[in-house]
Every structure is written in structure tokens, then in C-alpha cells.
Image (cartoon, grey):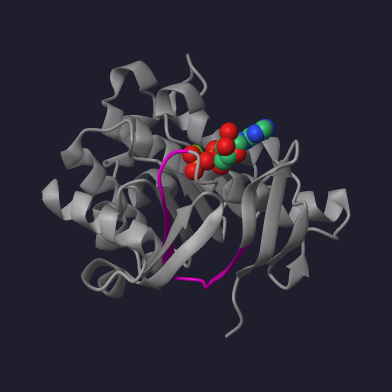
Amino acid sequence: MSALLEVDSLSVVFGGSPAVDDVSFRLRTGESVALVGGSGAGKSTVARAIAGLVSATSGRIVFDDVDLTTASTRAGRTLRRGMHLVFQDPYASLPPGMRVGDIVAEPMVIHRIGDRTARRDSVLDALASVRLTPAADFVDRYQHELSGGQRQRVAFARALVTRPRLLLADEPTSGLDASLRVEIVDLMSDLARTQDLAVLHITHDLALAARSCDAVMVMQDGVVVETGSSTEVLTNPSHRYTAALVAAATGAQ
Ligand SMILES: Nc1ncnc2c1ncn2[C@@H]1O[C@H](COP(=O)(O)OP(=O)(O)O)[C@@H](O)[C@H]1O
Ligand SMILES: [Mg+2]
């Protein structure tokens, strides 16, 4: 089966300095891959380039067999409806003062998908899939009535409601307590398997990445320095930087 997403020699240069330098990888449906690295490594820029929020300086981003770097703006926008970005901070990324049902329904409203009844059904499905149950109890709540973990689940429900095929999760757990982080990454790997989703999970936490993802890519200074299965990377890191991350991750547990 061909990959859902193929990133091929992607480079993004900001004002003369490369933030992302010749990055290549593939992502298949049902697969979740972690992009791990320290602050400033270029992780968010990779996700933003895929989502079309920054332009690729060179390279190709092929989604569903279409090269997004050469597709028209209109075609690119339509194709990118098949992907959704979840950000770090659910407090900042969810619209304030709205009820959960409306927050989750909003992407459907924006993309004019379904009528009221269809939207309500999709909202209930999405809430159930992130295990905010009974879903009907959450629909009328306000986000300030929710815990941090519940808010991030709402953010995922909102991401899933339009049935995207690719989820780009940029440090979705860094605002959460350690126990909730594990819950959220486990949820993401479940979603990849059960919802026919490909997941790119961006994190600085190698232990967390290895727990939930099939494969890990380690990024440093714009470059992917190591790629491998989660077990391989954790037990037998080949790059010095990865070894340092492994030592930090295992030392911290
Ligand atoms: N819009 C931008 N304009 C200029 N420089 C940027 C922009 N976005 C990111 N950068 C720079 O690109 C590099 C990579 O940033 P980023 O992708 O945010 O890293 P990470 O997510 O791994 O912390 C950093 O040096 C950052 O300062
Ligand atoms: Mg970032």
C-alpha cells in the first residue's frame, strides 16, 4: 500500500537560515510516528509545512498521491481538509466561551459539512471516540468546567469530527501532568488503529514517543539524525544525540 503522506527532501529556510533541512519520511494509514527533538529542532516547522501554514523552500509533500507543493492553492486547501493539527495548549487553541458541542462541531460548520442532525451525531461520535462519555453529558458543558485532560480530549474530538486521515499533533501533552500525558498518547495510538488515521506525534519526550508510536524520528538542528522502530531507537540508539535523549528519558523514570 502506498503511503498516505510522503515527505521528500523537505527544506524550509527562514531568512537565510534553514529550520528544516532535507527531511524525508513516509506515513501510512493506521501508523503513528513520533518526531522527537529539543526546542528549535524544526519539529513544528515540519508540521506547519505539511499543513500549509509555512511554504516549503524545496522538496515535496505528497498527500494522498498529490504533491501539495505544486498543487493549486484551492486544490491544496481541499486536500488539507483531510488533515488536522492539534496544538500544545488546549487553553489557547480552543475558542473560549463556547459549549463543548459547539467547539467540536465548529470544523463541520466551517467546512459546511452535514445538517444540524448529522453534526450532532458526528459530535457525539467524536466525543465517544476520545472517551468523553457519556458524550451527551459533555455537549452542553463549557470548557472552563473541564479539567486539562478533558480539554485536550475536546481538542482531539474537534480534530476528529471531520474524519481527517492525518492527525498532526504538535506537543499535545506538554501542558498536562505526567499521568494525563500517558493517557493522551495511549488515546492517540488507539485512534490511529481504530479510526484509520495516520498520526504524526511531535514531542520532546522520547520515552512518551516510544510508548505510543510505531516509529521514531529524532531531529536535531533541522536534520533527522535517526529513524527506527521505537524499540530499536530506545534500546540501540545509533546517534550520539539520540543516546543522550535515551539516557535522559530512562534516567528520568
Ligand atoms: N515563522 C518563522 N520565522 C522565522 N523563524 C522561524 C519561524 N518559525 C520557526 N522559526 C525558527 O526555525 C527553527 C525551528 O523552529 P521550530 O520548528 O519551531 O522548532 P521546534 O518545534 O522543534 O521547537 C527555530 O530556530 C525557530 O526560531
Ligand atoms: Mg515546536
Q: In this orientation, which residue lies closer to the viewer: 102 or 214?
A: 214
Q: In this orientation, which residue lies closer to the viewer: 94 or 60?
A: 60
99 relative to 156, above or below = above
Residue 172 sits in quarter: top left
x and y, in percent, of residue 240 in the image? 34, 61
| Part of the protein shown in magenta | 23-39
User: Would you say 154 lies left or right of 250 here?
Assistant: right
**Which residue appears at 75% of the width and 36% of the height?**
15
User: Would you say 63 lies left or right of 142 here?
Assistant: right
User: Quick check: can you spot residue 198?
Assistant: no
**Which residue appears at 41% of the width and 41% of the height?**
171
Q: Residue at the bottom extreme?
A: 1
x and y, in percent, of residue 95 in the image? 52, 22
244 relative to 176, above or below = below
Image-quarter location of ligand 1: top right
x and y, in percent, of residue 129 in the image? 36, 52
User: Would you say 33 lies left or right of 106 here?
Assistant: left
**Which residue appears at 38% of the width and 66% of the height?**
194
User: Quick check: can you spot residue 243?
Assistant: yes
User: Would you say 99 lies left or right of 73 here?
Assistant: left
Quick one: quadrant of the N terminus? bottom right
Residue 73 sits inside the magenta stretch: no
Residue 37 sits inside the magenta stretch: yes
x and y, in percent, of residue 233 in the image? 30, 69
